Amino acid sequence: MTARRCVALLVAALLVGCSSTERSDATPTTSASGSSLRGELTVSAAASLTDVFAAIGEAFAEQHPAVTVRFNFGSSGQLAQQIAEGAPADVVAFADTTAMQVLDDAGLLAAPAEVFATNELVVVTPPGNPAQIATLADLADASTVALCVETAPCGRFSDQLLTAAGVEVEESSVTRGRDVRSTLAAVTRGDADAAIVYVSDAAAVGSRVEVVEVPEAVGIVASYPVAGLADSDVGGVATAFVRYVLSDEAQTLLRDAGFGPP
Amino acid sequence: MNGGRVVRSGGAGTLVSVMAVAALAVVALPLVGLLRRVDWAGLPGALTTPEALSALRLSLVCSLAATAISVALGLPLAWVLARRRFPGRALVRGVVLLPLVLPPVVGGVALLSAFSRSGLVGRYLYDWFGVQLTFTTAGAVLAGAFVSLPFFVITAEAGLRGLDRRFEDAAATLGAGPAEVFGRVTLPLVAPSLAAGAVLAWARALGEFGATITFAGNIEGRTRTLPLAVYLLLDSDPEVAVGLSLVLLVVSLAVIVALRDRWSGELRSQR
């Protein structure tokens, strides 16, 4: 009895000793930002942020090893609506201040949103530009143009762009993607003649599309706000992530991905 | 009824009943929820908006065309599967029935790899004939035919297998040629199965979403069938989306009712 109890105590002591050693070994001492943050962070972000936020998330997790960052990418309008109806999220980053306003009006934000990047529209075509799209007006003659749905910011901006340029593309030639990445896919798969997406999306797929610069696009700028949500369980981590997105490190990543300054 | 069997009250009997009610609730509650969601007063208005009318018209055209293709191509295939023995018959049947189980969006990806402008066959269609199937109504029909063909084939094959060959043999003995035997003896006898198969195929083609949106895109008036319209309008115009959902629900109900003898008739014959 006594011997067994001794062994049990010994094993317990070893386990405790080992685990605390592991913990201190695993925590890197390189970062000065403090690894005391822990938990699972859910970030709901606009589809156009897919690649760059994955990189930002990775960099953030490196500095805070006890934090797991999960992303939920989609159309800003749809995400805002889902969150307003109770979908769980800790941080939101949208391609449009209108979508963020929905959450602000519902009192769901922990603090006022801040704009962390901007984006502009661009026309993309499959490599080789088979339909010879050179100007916005050419889109009216194309057999299939891919645009985002009107409930997504890129859809609203695209419609705005076409209206401002006086170009009318027949709805019967437009395939509407539910977010900018599915709109882009209509061209990268090769069968849509052109799509209107963000500069950052064109940069993300590189040579899989050809970019057609349209001067009229200069006037339309998408502002990307980011904010933490009020009823988050990991409020401290959320605030840290928002700060990180606004930091120089993340801003460099955003610039490299084709986003403009806030 | 079944004479001589003791029915246990309480215990296992009650548990089974409770679980049966739970199973029914899983299906019935969402349907009841949908019916309650409908704004009945605004329904006629919602269903006559340009988006709704376009989707209704397109769905009708695409589903009927897909069914016609499924029947025209499916009947010879069902015949071969039912009547001819050849090596690999089970494999052929397996391949034909695959779209029954394949996730529809996967079907769409598969269709793209075969029929897009850079696809296996699509590239020749485009380079030689200038024909593009993606983002077209024909593409939506193709997606519908892809998912509905197995429904027709499986039903038609079962019908052909269940046929008493003696009628055909008798007709042949009396001097009828193969075409006449088929037209005047076989076809009338399997007609109920063929009709049921066509209805099932039509219902499946009508409800197709994943393959259509992936292969044919989401274009108003060209490929935005009812399910795609519901998906799109859910965010921007929920009243129309719910109204169109009701239309599909009613059509589905009509199909179930039309084929009710199939579901229960087979069971009846087993007693």
Image (cartoon, rainbow, N blue to C red):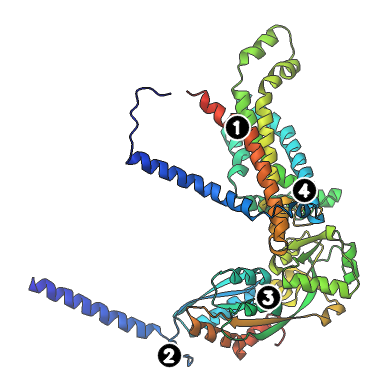
Q: Residues within 10 Å of mark 4 (few under 14, many from 20)?
A: many
Q: Residues within 10 Å of mark 2 (few under 14, many from 20)?
A: few
Give the chain of mark 3. Answer: A
Residue topped by disc 4: B56
Asked whether, in this view, residue A68 is left or right of residue A139, the answer is left
Give the chain of mark 4. Answer: B
Q: Quick check: B157 above or below B16? A: above
Report how far apart the C-alphas of labels 2 and 1 lie in the structure.
Answer: 71 Å
Q: Is residue B227 visible?
A: no
Which amino acid lies under the numbered mark 2 shown in the image of this protein?
A: Thr
Q: Nearer the viewer, mark 2 or mark 3?
A: 3
> Could you say where residue B54 lies in the image, as x and y percent from the top left?
81, 52
Give the chain of mark 1. Answer: B
Asked whether, in this view, residue A90 is left or right of residue B188, the answer is left
Residue topped by disc 1: B260
Asked whether, in this view, residue B149 is left or right of residue B219, the answer is left
> Could you say where residue B215 lies in the image, as x and y percent from the top left?
72, 53
Residue topped by disc 3: A99
Residue topped by disc 2: A29
Q: Quick check: B10 above or below B169? A: below
